[in-house]
Image (cartoon, coloured by chain):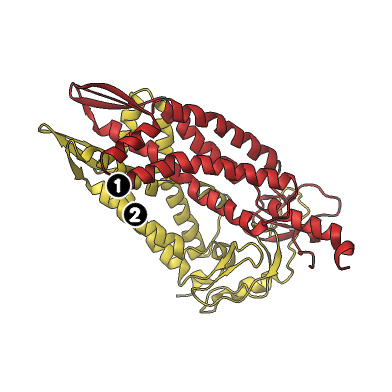
Chain colours: A red, B yellow
Amino acid sequence: MRPAVTALSLGLLSCHVCGQLARQPIGGGAVRCPRCNVPLHSRRPRSVSTTWALTLASMLLYLPANLLPIMETSSFLGSQQDTILSGVLFLWRSGSWPLAAVVFFASVMVPLLKVIALLHLLLSVQRRSSHRMLQRARLYRLVEFVGRWSMLDIYVIVILAALVRFQGLATVQAGPAALAFGGVVVLTMLAAMSFDPRLIWDAASARVAEGEEGEHG
Amino acid sequence: MANANGGKAWAADEQEAGREARSDDPHGPSWGGRLIACHECDLLQTAPELDLHQSARCVRCEALLLRNPVDSLERTLALAAAAALLYVLANFNPLVGIEMQGIRVEVTLFGAVQALWGDGMQAVAGLVFATVILFPVLELTMLMALLIQVRLGRRGRAFPLLFRLVRSLRPWGMIEVLLLGMLVSLVKLSHLSSVILGVAFWAIAALIIVLAAAAQSFNPALLWEARGTGARA
């Protein structure tokens, strides 16, 4: 296996804005893109620690987001508080199970799977694992793509709360979980953005460089 | 190639200037043979020559590296203008409405944000305002500003900043998620009242299609390469 030639291994920096390659000056130091003048870094600075902090914060918020009521309905029949999960159950019982599945997936499963995926990416990068790198790169792309769809429940509440305001008949209001849930979505999106996927592949260059003589020479 | 702030970088590809001048051939600018680093795994590779509609992925991590859509600049600009028009419709018309016991309630996008604000959920109202009104409007206007500058062949000093902003705003505009959210909430309401889909609802549905088409025809590499496009009739 030949070592992969990366920009980093040749002392080149690629601009994250316009893609221009630039040489790292011999003495090190701050470099700006010769074409678009943005500051260049070979890897996103403090990527792992920032991603850790944002992921942990989103895990904390995940609890109130799911335990507190996200919607408060009051009508002449009495008032009712719904969590995300009881909202899904309501949809399921009223017969719209495809929508129940969509909401369950977007609001409960996606944030959970995103956090698990981010933890997996962080831990494997920190262990310098060179195992299944392509799968992890795909996982990262999936996490980035799917993250925004978790906002679904927020919009559902917003529309319901804006429409159902028949004083005395029925009103719907957003509950405290809406804020926590919005926080989960924003924090997991920021966590995914602060993770530098190039770190996944850096393990390969390191592994090949170390084992070059041992394996085949 | 101005390099301000005393940075010591210089272009790694010395043939850079020569390549840029070639951008007036009928198949769009040529990247073939140029050295590029994958933005997702940092692998250095030689860019292949792309025909129209072709795209190139990284040989190692499969990230999308280059695309060559037909008439990228003109089509993206036209679609962005159409999207702006639809966006005006979406913001100044009722989204959805319900009718219950003879009372009819309709809501606009901004009205929904205001209602949430009035209920004491300012932070959530702010998040919704940003993701479905502010960010999409900013992204669209800045994208048009970029494309018009390239079309005219004159790039202002704010050009790189605009490009960065457009790219970082993109994931935060969530109109398509809003459309799905409206559908879910209407299904929830449909058993206790009749549901009315407003002009803005259809405008947003059309907007999503137009924005997807604009994203398909957009070629970010063109913004940095095509110097001669504006002169070509």
Q: How many marks?
A: 2
To which quarter of the image does residue A173 belong? Answer: top left
Q: Nearer the viewer, residue A197 or B192?
A: B192
For label 2, the residue is: B207
Q: Nearer the viewer, residue A191 or B136?
A: A191
Q: Nearer the viewer, residue B58 or B80?
A: B58
Judge the density around disc 1: few (<14), some (14-19), many (≥20) Cα neighbours within 10 Å. Answer: many
Residues at circles 1 and 2 in contact by the CB criterion of under 8 Å: yes
Residue A126, given in percent of the width and then of the height, sits at: 73, 44
Q: Going 82% across and 54% down the picture, which residue do you hit?
A: A25
Residue B157 visible at all: no
For label 1, the residue is: B90
Question: Quadrant location of the N terminus of chain B?
Answer: bottom right
Q: Tell me: A68 left or right of A28.
A: left
Q: Chain of mark 2?
A: B
Amino acid on which the number 1 mark rests in the picture: Ala
Task: Give the CA separation, mark 1 to mark 2.
Answer: 9 Å
**In the displayed image of the protein, which residue is found farthest to the bottom?**
B26
Residue B181 visible at all: yes
What element does badge 1 sit on?
Answer: helix
Residue A71, given in percent of the width and then of the height, sits at: 34, 28
The vertical placement of A141 against A162, above or below, is: below
What element does badge 2 sit on?
Answer: helix
Q: Going 73% across and 47% down the picture, which residue do you hit?
A: B5
Residue B28, given in percent of the width and then of the height, sits at: 53, 74
Judge the density around disc 2: few (<14), some (14-19), many (≥20) Cα neighbours within 10 Å. Answer: many
Amino acid on which the number 2 mark rests in the picture: Leu
Q: Earlier in the sequence, mark 1 or mark 2?
A: 1
To which quarter of the image does residue B50 belong? Answer: bottom right
